[in-house]
Amino acid sequence: MEDIEITTSSFRTHVHVVDLDDAYDVFVKKKSILNKLEHESNETITTIIRSSMAAFIAAGTTCAIYNPLDCLRVRWQLLPRTEPALSRGLVNYGVGVIKHEGLFQGLWRPGLAPNVTGMALSASIRFGLYEVLRDSMRSDDYNGNEDETPKKSFGQMFVAGMICGALGYSMATPFHLLKTLTQADLIRAGSNPSTASMRNVIDNGGILNCYRGATPLAFRGACFTSGQMLGYDGMKTFGKSKLGVEDGVFLHIISSISASFGASLFAAPADLTMTKYMSDPPEQARSLLYHMRSIYAERGILSFWRGWNLMFLRLAPVTLTYCTLYEKGRHLLGIGYLT
């Protein structure tokens, strides 16, 4: 511990060497922390952007393939209880639609464009933010080591799914509304071309009318995504940690089936209510409470799960296709599989 004497023509002073060393050490530590935070921030932004891109492409492709199943679901749910087709079953009803209207005109084309756009936008938000939001709630005993997997709980998956689902679906409300109106028009007008358009929606209630049903849709999206993530992320976590299954196509398939079950179970009541509410013509719109009461009047609380089996059967291949494409997209974009 020695002093250094610094002398100039105007002053003389002594600087303690130890003080300089301490100050330098503090500076280096602060610089290291700032660099680490900047690196983590850049990694987070990169993960969000690339995950959103993978989800957008995967969801758009999947919706384009499976739009006939979604259209059939909406048409089936909106059939009046007095409709004779209900007694013949869903399969016969679908066959009848294809026979009289054609596969493309009756089931594939209706609502295709808004459905693809809305689901791609919704998925990019939900899956783009999910992993980062879930990990932001991780336990404090995670130290950020590269070889250490962040600890996560089912509660974190559920909450992250709820938040991302509500945000993603509410943002995509105009597209979901237009899709539902387009498909519902087929029930009211038979095989005539649909007249639903965004211009008609705006003319009958202004720009805010585009977000009619945003609340039930956000609630449905929260229920759907929380069940989906509990099923998918939960099964992946259990399979890797408890069963020793390698993260790959097989685990993605099993997790996709689990995700379909969870999403169907959680979202069926909100899905039915939302479909009936959003399918009302703008000039005959009825309240959300009205539809809830009418559904309950049919067979009690179980009425809210009407079409649950159809929803699961529809979601199973859709989720399998989507999750496989999404995981492959993440891998190709350099951020790896969902951890």
Image (spheres, grey):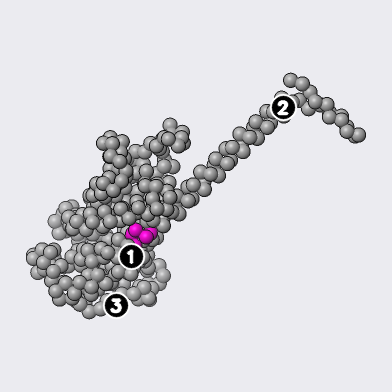
Of residues 259 and 85, the one nearer the viewer is 259
Residue 306 percent location from the top left of the image: 17, 57
| Occupied quadrant, residue 156 | top left
Which residue is under mark 3?
195
* N-terminal label among 1 and 2: 2
Dot 2 surroundings within 10 Å: few (below 14), some, or many (20 or more)? few
* N-terminal label among 2 and 3: 2
Q: Is residue 46 left or right of residue 165?
A: right
> What's the residue at 20%, 66% (across, down)?
72
Residue type, label 2: Asp
Residue type, label 3: Thr
Residue 167 colored in magenta in the image: no
Quadrant showing the N terminus: top right
> What's the residue at 13%, 71% (across, down)?
96
Q: Is residue 146 above or below residue 61?
A: above
What are the residue bounds of the magenta stretch?
A: 56-60
Which residue is under mark 1?
116
Which residue is under mark 2?
19
> What's the residue at 69%, 28% (across, down)?
21
Q: Main secondary structure of the magenta part?
A: helix
- Mark 1 element type: helix
In the rendered structure, are the residues bearing label 1 and label 2 in contact, judged by CB atoms less than 8 Å apart? no
